[in-house]
Structures are given as structure tokens and as C-alpha cells.
Image: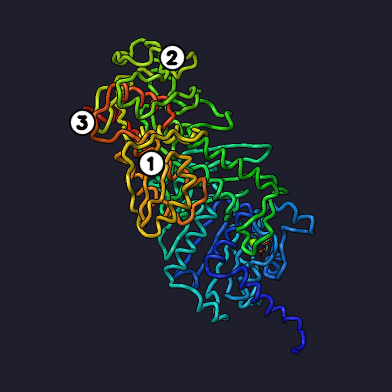
Amino acid sequence: MPEIQILDPHVADLIAAGEVVERPASVVKELMENAFDAGAQNVTVEIRGGGVPYIRVTDDGCGMAPEDAGVAFLRHATSKLRDERGLEAIGTMGFRGEALAAISAVSHIELTTRRRGAREGTLVTLTAGEIQEMGPAGCPEGTTMVVRDLFYNTPARLKFLKSDRSEASACVQAALRCALGRPEVSVRMLRDGSEEFFSPGDGRQDSCVYSLLGRELASSLLPCRGEDEGMKVSGFVSSPSAGRGNRAAQFFFCNGRFIKSQLLQAALEQAYKNSLLTGRYPACALYLELSLGSVDVNVHPAKTEVKFSYEKRVFDLVYHTVLSALQGEDRSGAEPEPTVRETPAPKQDFFRSMSAEQYRAARSPVPKAPAKPEQPFGSGMTLRAPEMPIQTRMDLYTDAKPTGPVEKAPPPTGLAPAAPSVPVEKSVQNVESPRLPDHKILGEAMKTYILVEVGEQLLLIDKHAAHERMNFDRLKAADRKIMSQALLAPVTLRPDTGDGELLEQYGELLGELGFEIEPFGRGEYIIRSVPADILPSDAAPALEEILEKLRRGKTPDPQSARDEILHTVACKAAIKAGWDTSRAEQERIVAEVLCGRIKYCPHGRPVSAVLTRKDLDKMFKRIV
Ligand code: ADP
Ligand code: MG
């Protein structure tokens, strides 16, 4: 048995370096966090050659006194934590006093620092953690830390690094996350002499997100804000139509610190359920503000994971805030009504120059009627519409009158003429009917898009997508067994090998949703009944599609399986592009879109688009 020895402190530093300093990006993160903790307003990060040869972080923070400048590199030397009670409420990014010791142990360092108001600064150079020179130096207020030849004395670590290019992009990514968490700090990032990004540091989340994530992503973002007993969340989430192929654009921050959190990720994604295609992920920049005592940041070496004291409350807050944003609502209710804008589409640079409220108003999928701000639509904010009974396919395809209580707004003065007189909803009168803005259905283009004039805007509605969403919401809301129709001539189904098992595994669920299927022997099945919404000729194709989805989804949980099946039923039951659609059907679809109840089909495609007079005038060069 070998003898137990206390490690030489230098070796201990090297081990610690392995924990804190995994790659150049970790150095960038630690140095930037120190700059933030020093109260910097401007931070410049520069890397060369992937970060190993050169990393420099300059800040205009408080700087260090000469006597502190050398001590800072000792292990567990920190100005941020005094005793163990401090650990219960950590308000700084750092607190362990490990980073500078760990970084300096595996590199050459040059530190210049000057306290605010001090006559001169201090220069310290170190090699492998040993101070080489130290003395007064002329330098600006604040701190500059240059790290050269990272891992020069630990070749094993060097071997594990990736190419310069991937290390460099990891550095940029790390810096970006830090910068995104601090809208009040201006950060400039340089890579091999050229600027990677610059954030203005004006304290606004919107300009920070815009400058760091780019116009393309920013233009798909919806603002959100929510609060619950001292916990706050704010920021931006992507609209369902802008789903992404991975989660790389999901940024969560807790008290200014970038964190990875399965809890927050689940809360976010749960809110998109049924409005995002499977395999697509939302993007977000969400900022949580919690009391320091209700979050423990001391659970992970890199401090990117945290422990919330009240996980359920955090989950609920994030979930409901995101959901409200997606529904165009604002939970806090504290913000003023959005101002009316003429054009709903985001314009270049407008993200930067608008408040979050204006941004939200502008991003409303359906614009407000310009002359009637007291009757907004599309945002779903002031319209507490009653559940409108939605017709089954049967109603749609007979000439039966829809029973939906769609009431017109009183004729306004000086606006477009009232909608054409279509014999709708005479029977049911509901005092709380949604009041729709004045509109005129102009007709249908290509048997696909319903054209509606609303004030100065032309609304185009994808009738299939809209109807599919109406069907899906109705089916999903039905807590009873879904109405099923027996097929006069039962249809046989020969599923692919393996799918028979799926049919049996999900037999009960399919039964609840209106599909009655029996094994017929030799791998064949008989479909005896299907949901009432589906045409008999669609019975087999619908089931094949459902099996395909269930197969692809491996073993989905019952709720997801149910949703997948309902998607298919909703789609098959929806009117199709290319079909003739009666005026009454058009009216009902238009009403649903105008009152803001439906915005995206169950796959996340938008159901409507808008052309404003300005857009048209531009198209025809009436204006430039
Ligand atoms: P920690 O951040 O956990 O305290 P570090 O090793 O990162 O530990 O830093 C050690 C100490 O050095 C800090 O507590 C702080 O007092 C000082 N320091 C480091 N970087 C800066 C900076 N950019 N400006 C001012 N002080 C700094
Ligand atoms: Mg630190």
C-alpha cells in the first residue's frame, strides 16, 4: 500500500486547473466574470490562434491595489467571500478564489491594474503561478489580464484540445453567453484582430439580444415578462414558426449568470407543445431574477448549473410566462397597452429602436385596425372571447348554418364598408361574443388562401392550416371520448412489419380517439370505425400516418402519442387547399383568425400573413 502524501500545493493547483480551466474558453469565461464582478462597464476580449497562444481581457472596473495584485493569484484568494455564511447568498460571479490560481498555474500571465482614482497602476508577471516581476506601471484605470501559452506545461491537456478553429469558436461562444447575460455591460470581442461581436451595454435586453444574436434570430423573437412572489423572468422567446434544428439558441440566465438547466428547458419547451414541429426547438434569451438565497450556485465546478430552492415555482413561472407570450398576452399586466403601429412586419433595425412593448405590438401576427385602437384584435389581449362552438366536418360540408356566435363590431365611422351579408349565425346570440374588427372577405386565391380586407391591410389566410388548428384545438379540448363513425364497408389495413405491434400497443388510446381496429389474422387488421371528422376514404391513410409517427417517436408518452394522433385527425378533417369552400366556412375561419384565437397550425406554420397598404404602395412604387 503506497504511503498517503499531501500533494505539493503546485500539483494541487494543476489539478484544480483541470477543473476550472478545461480549455481556452474557460479562461475567457473566468476573466470576463472577474471583470463583471469588478463593476466594469466596458469589457474587451481578444483571442489569437484559438486562444492557446493569447487571450486578453481588459475592463474598466475597480482595479486592484498593488498589495492585492500579487495575492490574487494565490489559491482561495478572493475578495468576494469572507466566511461560510456568504455561501448562502452569492451575488458575484466568482467566490472560490480559484480561477486566477488555476489559470496562472498553466500559463504565462501579464496583469496590469489600477484602482479607480489611484495615481499609478501595478504590473505583475507570472509563469506557472510564480511571480516573475511586480512593480508600479503606468496604465489606465481598470484591469488588463493577458494569458499566453495556455497549457504550455501540461502537454496532456494540450493534446485534448480541438483545432484552433473550434477552440476559437468555443471562446467566442463563451464570451457571447457572458455578454448576453449582462445587457448593462458593453462587450467587444476580437478574434485574430477582427471584431466578432459588440454589445452596446445600454442596459436593454432587446438591444443586447439584437446585437449578439443577430437580426435574423432577433426578428423571430417575442418579448415576455412574468413575476411571481419576488421571482421574475423576462426576455425573449422565438415564435413557433421560427423553430430551430437544435437547442443551441436557448440561453437561460439566472441573476446574470448563464446557466444550463433541464428544468428551464423543459418549462420552455412545454409551452410550445402542439405549436412546434417535432424535432424543432424554440430559441430564447430568458433572464431569471431570484433572491440570492433561493438559488445555490455552488454545485458545479464551472458554476453553469444551479440548484433552485423552489423548482416547481420556477418551472411554473417560466412555463406560464412563455405560454402567455406565445398567446400574445402579458402576465404581469403592468405594462401599458401596446401602441399601434402601421406595419406589423419587423423593419430593419427596429428591434434596436423599440421598447419591448412596441416590439410585441409590432410582432402581433394579426395587426390591429389602425383607426380603432379601442378594438384591438390579434393580440388576444382585450378579447376574452367565449368558446366558439366549432363545426364538425359534417357542418362544413352540408350547407348547415354555423352556430358560432360571431358578432360584428358596430359599423365604425369612416372605415371600410361592413362585411358582405352572409347568412351566418342567426340562431345563437351570445352577449359576450367576440367583437371582430370591421372586415370584408374578398374571396379566395388559388382555392388556398382566403383574402380579407381589414382597414388598410390585406390579410391572407391559409385555409387548411387555419382549419387544421381549429380542429386540433376542438379535439384536444374534448375530454370525452371522441365521436366515432362506423364504416359501412370496413376497411382492411396491412401495416408494415412491426407496426402491428404498435397498433396493439396503442389500441386502447386509438379506441378512445375514435379508431376501432380488430386483428384479422395474417398480419391484417380491419378498421371498423374512425373519428367522425374523418372521411371513410381517409381511414387507412390516416392510420398509416399515425403509425409512421408513433414509430418515429419511438415510445412516446401517452400524452404525446395522443397529440400525434389528434394532429393527424385534425389534418385529415381539415378542408384542403384546392377544395371549394363555402362563404359560411370562410366566415368562420376568418372570425377565428381575426379574434386572435388561432395563429399557428399544430405544426407551427403560421395561418395568416399580412400585406399593408404601405407594402402594396411600395410594391407599385407609389412610395419609395
Ligand atoms: P474569485 O473571482 O472567485 O474571487 P479569482 O481567482 O477569479 O477568484 O480572482 C481572485 C481575486 O482577484 C478576486 O476576488 C478579485 O479580488 C481579484 N480580481 C480578479 N480579477 C479582477 C479584475 N478584473 N478586477 C478587479 N479585481 C480582480
Ligand atoms: Mg473569478
Q: Distance between the residues labelled 2 and 3?
A: 47 Å
Q: What element carries label 3?
A: loop
Residue pointed to by mark 3: 621
Give the mark nearest the N terminus, 1 or 2.
2
- Is residue 497 in view? yes
Residue farthest toward the front in the current orientation of the protein:
521
Residue 229 appears left or right of 376:
right
Q: Nearer the viewer, mark 1 or mark 2?
A: 1
Q: How far apart are marks 3 and 1 (CA)?
A: 60 Å
Callout 2 environment at 10 Å: few (<14), some (14 to 19), or many (20+)? few
Say the numbered circle drawn on residue 178.
none
Q: In which quarter of the image is ligand 1?
A: bottom right
**Residue at image x 48%, y 66%?**
47
Q: How far apart are marks 1 and 2 (CA)?
A: 36 Å
Give the mark nearest the N terminus, 2 or 3.
2
Residue pointed to by mark 1: 528
Callout 1 environment at 10 Å: few (<14), some (14 to 19), or many (20+)? many
Give residue 332's quadrant in the image: top right
> If the image is split into quadrants, where does the C terminus sit?
top left
Residue pointed to by mark 2: 428
Amino acid carrying label 2: it is Val
Question: Residue 468 placed where, x, y %?
Answer: 37, 35
Q: What element carries label 2?
A: loop
Amino acid carrying label 3: it is Lys
Q: Is mark 1 on a helix, strand or loop?
A: strand
User: Is the Cβ of the residue at disc 1 closer than 8 Å to that at disc 2?
Assistant: no
